[in-house]
Image: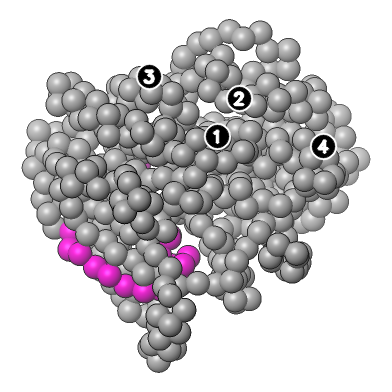
Amino acid sequence: MTSITRGRPSSSTWTNWARTTSATPRRRASPADEAELSALVAGAAEDGLRVRAVGAGHSFTPAAVTDGLLLDLDRLAMVERIARTRSGVEVTVGAGMRLHRLNEVLAAAGLAMRNLGDIDRQSVAGAISTGTHGTGARLGGLCTAVRGLRVVGADGSVVDADEARHPELFAASRLGLGTTGILSSVTLEVVPAFLLRAQEEPWPLDRVLAELDGPDGLVDANDHVEFYWFPHTRRALTKRNNRLSPDEEAAAVRRLADHGPGTVARARTWIDEELLSNGAFEVVNRVATALPRATARLNAVSARALAPRTYVAPSHEVFVTSRRVRFREMEYAIGREHLADALGAVEDWLRTSGEHVPFPVEVRFAAADDVWLSTAHGRPTAYVAVHQYARLPYARYFAAVERIMTERGGRPHWGKLHGLDAGRLGQLYPRFEDFRAVRDTADPRGVFANDYTDRVLGRPGYSGSTTNEWT
């Protein structure tokens, strides 16, 4: 076989965005098309190498790490088709397409994703495979929009999987950490493009918690709601994003056409996000690193410095924010009914532990879904994400929050830091063994595994041992 089908020898080190993990694979390759991808996978498997794919490296875990063949899928980023179906519109794209590029393509076609997370640097395959989600009590994560996949197996074969063809492989692969094969393309359900009215306001935390639930509460009365609580304070920033009525949307479209798409929104975004939230926030975190005892005062100043704002913009401009301050993150999904209690326990631990945390705690929401390894499987969900500045230690804080969340049945985000293994995770997911059975059939030799997937999903022939280790 030629070097093209084997990949190039590599002594270079790959590192993820958060600088929490790295790898020095024996080979690296960036296939130009599906045929080359298939040959590369088959060649590596023949040589006894394990294979992992990498997108933007936005997972905080070692999900992409391998000592074998590391595949960069950035060149698999073409739009294959946009098609109308009985249920709506579907777009099929290369698995390596980045979300920000997907948003541009959809906007040009008058389309949009129904929901998005707040970062758009990830690849489509990486985002769905690790459970990326946005917020909205009636909406699921990105994997719930998947309608079809092409999966490259260890022998180089390509399988089209959807609800009608290979339905179990489809069910396992749309959120499976890349362990059933390498995704070469993804088909997503999309919707007509829409505008959102964004309302951002600082509120007392007590008011946020008191008004969260009920038919007229924040979560159910808004299309998308989230809030950021500043530790060591009782203050939060609330964000409510809602679709406009048809008349409101028509008027907003005319205004945006007069001033240029998103002109006003982007001007405010640069001031509030680039200058205040990113530039000034970097300074706040550096001061907190040098003077830990000033953290509470700094958080209080940050919380009170945020001004209310309301603007209208295309959905993807509202959903996505710029994140230039480097951090570490852990996120847990818990039943919505446990949220206030869990946040109270985190606040109590921070007060008694002496830990200093300058980063806000982010809270989002999602509808129950039926995706086998979705963190929202089978229950309306609240997500609690804790962050720590990259220059500060995080393990003690994250371990304490993990204990609080697991006591309430919490499920960790697959792409963010956590300490659980397959023994505990198997108790949290009703379809965990179904997933493992499909994974073991698709990849019995573990070609697409690594140490992280062995820990969280178990190896083929998994014995059920339980350990807890941070990676």
* Mark 4 crowdedness (10 Å alpha carbons): few <14, some 14-19, many ≥20: many
> Dividing the image into 4 quarters, which one contains the N terminus?
top right
Mark 4 residue type: Gly
Label 4 or label 2, whichever lies nearer to me, is 2
- Residue 5 appears anywhere in the view: no
Residue 399, horizontal then vertical, whole percent = 35, 22
The spot of residue 232 in percent (x, y) is: 15, 36
* Secondary structure state at the residue bearing disc 2: loop
Magenta segment: does it hold 308? yes
Residue under label 2, please give it.
430
- Which residue bears the numbered disc 4? 153
Q: Secondary structure at mark 1?
A: loop
> Above or below — where is 201 with respect to 159?
below
Q: Are marks 4 and 2 in contact (CB under 8 Å)?
A: no
Q: CA distance from mark 1 to mark 4?
A: 30 Å
Q: Say which amino acid is labelled 3.
A: Glu
**Kind of residue at badge 1:** Gly
Earlier sequence position, callout 2 versus callout 1: 1
Mark 1 or mark 3, which is nearer the start of the sequence? 1
User: Which circle marks residue 224 in the picture?
Assistant: none
Residue 236 visible in the snapshot: yes
Q: Earlier in the sequence, mark 4 or mark 2?
A: 4
Q: Position of residue 46 (x, y in %)?
A: 86, 29
| Left or right of 43, for residue 392 | left
Which portion, as a residue range, is magenta? 306-328
